[in-house]
Image (tube, rainbow, N blue to C red):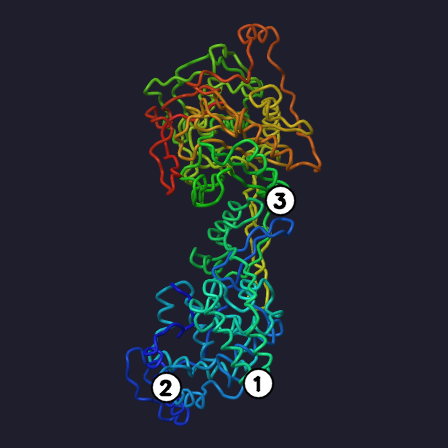
Amino acid sequence: MPKKRSGGGLSPTQQAAKFLGVSVLAGAVLAGIALPAVGALGLAAKGSVEGFDALPANLKTPPLSQRTTILDAEGGTIATVYSRDRTVVDLKDISPYMQKAIVAIEDSRFYEHGAIDLKGVLRALNKNARSGEVSEGASTLTQQYVKNVFVEEAGDDATKVAQATQQTIGRKIQELKLAIQVEEELGKKKILENYLNITFFGQQAYGVEAASQRYFSKHAKDLNVQEAALLAGIVQSPSRYDPVNDEAEATKRRNVVLNRMAQVGDISTAEAEKAKKAPLGLKVSKPKNGCITAVKNASFFCDYVREVFLSDKVFGKTRKDRAKVWNQGGLTIRTTLDPQAQKSVQQSLKDHVNQSDSVAAASTLVEPGTGKVLAMGQTKPYGYGKNETEINYSVDHSMGGSNYGFPTGSTFKPFVAAAALEEGRPATQEYSSPYEMPYPEPVQTCSGKPWLNTDGATVPNESESEVGPYRLKEAMALSVNTYFVQMVADIGLCPVMKMADALHVVQGNGDKLPEVPAVSLGSKGVAPLTMASAYAAFASRGMYCTPVVIESITQKIGNKQKSLDVPKSTCSRAMSEKTADTVNTLLRGVIDSGTGKKAGLTDRDSAGKTGTTDERKNAWFVGYTPNLSGAVWVGSASQQVQMKNITIGGVYHPLVFGGAVPGPIWKDAMTGALEGKGSSSFNVIDIPDEDKDKKKDKDKDKDRDRDKPDDGNNGDEGFIAGLTNGGTGDGGNGGPGGFPGGNLIQGPGNGPGGRR
């Protein structure tokens, strides 16, 4: 709805009717004051009250909504967000010219009368009668302030705003009585200060400080006489006298204010004439509201901060309560965003994937041991145009992410290994691992009802040369599908589910992972932030910490500040130190000699795992150092693009797999984020290699480049089909979810998960 001062923009007839009502009410109120014992005014009209004395005389002034500033970890501004752009200032920080201008044009007898200016009423009646039009009103500055309080309290509720501004006798009587209270309690200077901070000046600017910044890019205390006159003139009708859109009309109005200032003796006639000849001198600052304006390419991080605020009960019992605090604003939110890490993530994404590509990439970095989210970026920027999106690919749907997250492929295999190690299986565990095999059955579940391979589904490895037996170390490095199928059959599904729960690995829609074998190969969609946080538990030797993005919050209410409680990371042991150390050793092997060689860091210990899903619709690399964990996803949000014979970032790829595109993104992002920062080493476990003679025999059949992808039918890790729901899968993508602008996000899916 249009925002204008109450009474602005009315027709002459409407203004006359309003003025007549005010005049009558002034007399009625005086009668009520003179005859308190009577206790009734005898007024009867829709919306009126039975008696003046019966009206409450306690004006509840809500805290003025102000802008909120979101900062990075070093105190740099990321973005400003607001329901109403306002910065409350003291009267001493408002130019004397501004104070005089608003009084001159709105209520020149402000310092001479009480809440009601009876002399002004009579004078205005006489002047308007002689002119034949409404050229002067009778509402005092105090009355206007009371009405603005009602409007402020209504917020963005159109119904409440209408009630606050309705032109009824009852409403006017209430405003007049409250104006009397305000005059008695606050005094003239405080009323003027409050009025200048609450009133609307157009162009999304509430209060004189925001208006001064919007139109002149300066503080309110620095306004000169002609600038002050312009702002004072806008108040009556912000749309009509908008200097940005109608300079001529705004100039006329400014000059009216200057003339009035001269008439009441605030400035000389000569000063007024000189000021009237001056140009408007606009130096407009465009409104910068919302996460879409965030610097450091941190729009999605900013939006995630907002979602955390609105969803966490530490900020209020209900979402409505939390939204009220957020919209009230005045918050200074210091976040965990590391400027160096954020810059590195976004630069790496930009270097490897173009905004206009048919696929997107997203990356999130998390600090092990604290849960702090240090960086969050993606190649499709926040926006509403082509190759832009409102969807944050890094987080769950409830926090502004995709409907279901993205299938993780073989990046899930370390969770299976951790579960087996916790169950007492040795790091040298060996399985026959044939090239292809039927999914073994029965597989035990937490419910006690075993899973059965009723459809006779089979699972292959990447190529026919990948034939066991394998031990865990080599099976992880090469991401051998049949090995992990046999491991799940050995230990059962329940330990895997318990490990996923301990690492807080859930689907992107918030649901728990289904207890079916295909989940062990990454068939279900998970958000990158979830994966980065889970892998951070390996880096911190088994301690999982919930992700956090807010370090501290202070809230300014009026001119006072207070600190708010903020969510804290909760850390819990997800696995033993020995298990975590063993997984770290295994995943170092993935980078040293396995599918993730292109992602390895050269200056410090690193570990990680690749993942590629069915039909190459998703490619992942999730990895970490002892002090930083990160996940990179590449794919189509709609799950409609198969990454075969595709150009990404200007580079042609016959087949995309986890070690090729996501791996280098992760390497560059981590390198920049950790530059100049200390390094430490993993606690490495000695895991004996396979028997040399046995390994030599197998190597005769494996004279090939381990990084070379397959023919594209099964991805670079091979895959199982249709196992997620007891062998009745549909390919893993389900029906499309829905977002406008072409951003269709995959459905829950029932089919295959991932590969290498």
Residue 31, position as x, y percentages in the image: 38, 92
Residue 25: give its label: 2
- Front residue (pair 434, 239): 239
Quarter of the rendering containing residue 121: bottom left
Where's the N terminus, which quadrant? bottom left
- Front residue (pair 498, 36): 36
Q: Which amino acid does label 1 sit on?
A: Gly
Residue 332: give its label: none
Residue 8 left/right relative to 315 = left
- Is there a contact, CB below 8 Å, between mark 3 and mark 2? no
Residue 265: give its label: 1
Looking at marks 1 and 3 on the same chain, the residue that comes earlier in the sequence is marked by 1
Mark closer to the observer (3, 2): 2
Q: What residue type is labelled 2?
A: Leu
Residue 338: give its label: 3
Callout 1 secondary element: loop
